[in-house]
Image (cartoon, rainbow, N blue to C red):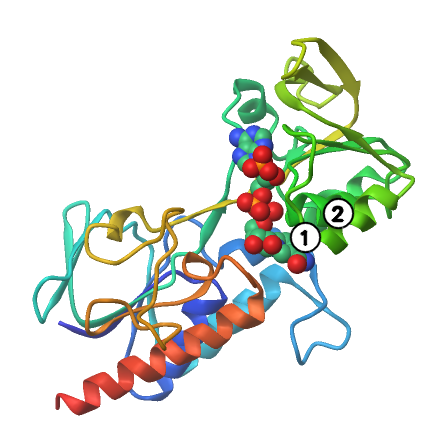
């Protein structure tokens, strides 16, 4: 039986692991399918305090991992499929393996939402379809790109990409941006950004050649189709929190994000179970805020265990 199991190795999970390990709780950390979390897909992280020259995402996560290991955190690669949080002992199942713990911190993050097209699957990553302008934008210096979406993320990505690309076409399915006023204003005012309103992507062109050559869009008002030539396509249509395996026990909102108890950021509706990072927070979604939540969750778990000893 474990004192504490931490699910996820993004900034929230690894910070929780550092705190739990330093409290002598010997945490077991389950890594999931993207060890290090979303930051490992980023290049330079310039806004994490303490790194004045920036640090690449992979290195930052590796350092957090080592920091927790130094104090006794243990890691296992596995994928939790179901849980039973109904008793004092929390039960987690991954295939044939069953884990038991007194407390659990769920910091499973969120995954970028995709359009679900075949061509998207074929061209994702090295083919030129991406969900991360920060990571991949610099590859498109001097080349035209498109961004799909109409929220703050899409605007942020489009604005960022204007640093490298002569023309960024923002493809949105409606005739008005969902983004906050200031982001929308900045986007609309930027001469390098062209809006393609009321349009949905029906195909990423270039699958045969394994490199994006354009995007085929359909106007949802008049049904007309056209191709927009580009070398890179960035999808920014929101995220899906990785909470499905826990939804029958832990409260979630209509978008699937965990809902902490009133007055807390990290206490779930089940005693001894805590939630942290992007699976809870759909507003800030920053490395440092996730780390802060991981710290809070570990301190709450430590307190809860101490009260019961
Ligand atoms: P979001 O606000 O949910 O916006 C998603 C956008 O994608 C919407 O415009 C939506 O269209 C579109 N969309 C969704 N599914 C689609 C589909 N299948 N096909 C085509 N378009 C689709 O997500 P987000 O932009 O990632 O932002 C998430 C949260 O983070 C927000 O609270 C946002 O304010 C915050 N955020 C803040 C900042 C910042 O302040 N700097 C930066 C990034 C994110 P509709 O508009 O038609 O629904």
Classify residue 220 as left or right of residue 162.
left
Query: Residue 155: image x %, image y %?
Result: 72, 45
Classify residue 19 as left or right of residue 201.
left
Q: Quadrant of the N terminus?
A: bottom left
Query: In this view of the protein, can residue 25 be seen by the observer?
Result: no
Q: Which quarter of the frame holds ligand 1?
A: top right
Query: Residue 142: image x %, image y %?
Result: 90, 36
Seen from the viewer's position, the closer of residues 262 and 95 is 262
**From the Cβ of disc 2, is ligand 1 less than 8 Å away?**
no
Query: Residue 258: image x %, image y %?
Result: 35, 58
Q: Residues within 10 Å of mark 1 (few under 14, many from 20)?
A: few
Question: Residue 184 bears which disc, if any?
Answer: 2
Task: Determine whether the residue tagged by mark 1 lies in a helix, strand or loop.
Answer: loop
Q: Quadrant of the C terminus?
A: bottom left
Question: Residue 180 bears which disc, if any?
Answer: 1
Seen from the viewer's position, the closer of residues 19 and 109 is 109
Q: Residue furthest left?
A: 87
Task: Determine whether the residue tagged by mark 2 lies in a helix, strand or loop.
Answer: helix
Asked if the residues shown at circle 2 and circle 1 are in contact, with their CB atoms under 8 angstroms apart, the answer is yes
Q: Residue at x 67, y 10 (%)?
A: 222
Classify residue 152 as left or right of residue 15.
right
């Amino acid at each position: 039986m474990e004192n504490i199991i931490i699910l996820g190795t993004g900034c929230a999970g690894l910070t929780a692991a550092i705190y739990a390990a330093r409290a002598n709780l010997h945490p077991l950390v389950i890594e999931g399918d993207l060890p290090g979390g979303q930051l490992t897909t980023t290049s330079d992280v310039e806004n994490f305090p303490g790194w004045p020259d920036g640090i690449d995402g992979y290195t930052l996560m590796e350092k957090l991992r080592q920091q927790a290991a130094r104090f006794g955190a243990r890691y296992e690669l596995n994928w939790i499929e179901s849980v039973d949080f109904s008793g004092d002992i929390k039960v987690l199942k991954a295939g044939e393996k069953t884990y038991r713990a007194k407390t659990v911190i769920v910091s499973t993050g969120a995954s970028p939402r995709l359009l679900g097209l075949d061509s998207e699957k074929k061209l994702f990553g090295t083919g030129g379809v991406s969900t991360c302008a920060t990571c991949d934008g610099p590859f498109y210096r001097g080349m035209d790109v498109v961004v799909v979406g109409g929220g703050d993320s899409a605007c942020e990505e489009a604005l960022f990409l204007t640093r490298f690309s002569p023309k960024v076409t923002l493809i949105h399915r409606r005739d008005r941006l969902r983004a906050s006023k200031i982001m929308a204003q900045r986007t609309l005012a930027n001469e390098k950004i062209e809006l393609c309103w009321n349009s949905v992507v029906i195909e990423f062109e270039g699958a045969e050649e394994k490199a994006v050559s354009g995007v085929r869009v359909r106007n949802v008002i008049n049904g007309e189709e056209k191709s927009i030539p580009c070398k890179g396509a960035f999808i920014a249509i929101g995220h899906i929190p990785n909470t499905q395996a826990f939804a029958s026990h832990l409260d979630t909102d209509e978008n699937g994000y965990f809902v902490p108890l009133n007055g807390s950021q990290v206490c779930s509706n089940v005693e001894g179970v805590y939630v942290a990072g992007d699976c809870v927070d759909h507003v800030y979604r920053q490395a440092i805020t996730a780390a802060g939540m991981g710290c809070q969750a570990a301190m709450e778990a430590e307190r809860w265990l101490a009260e019961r000893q």
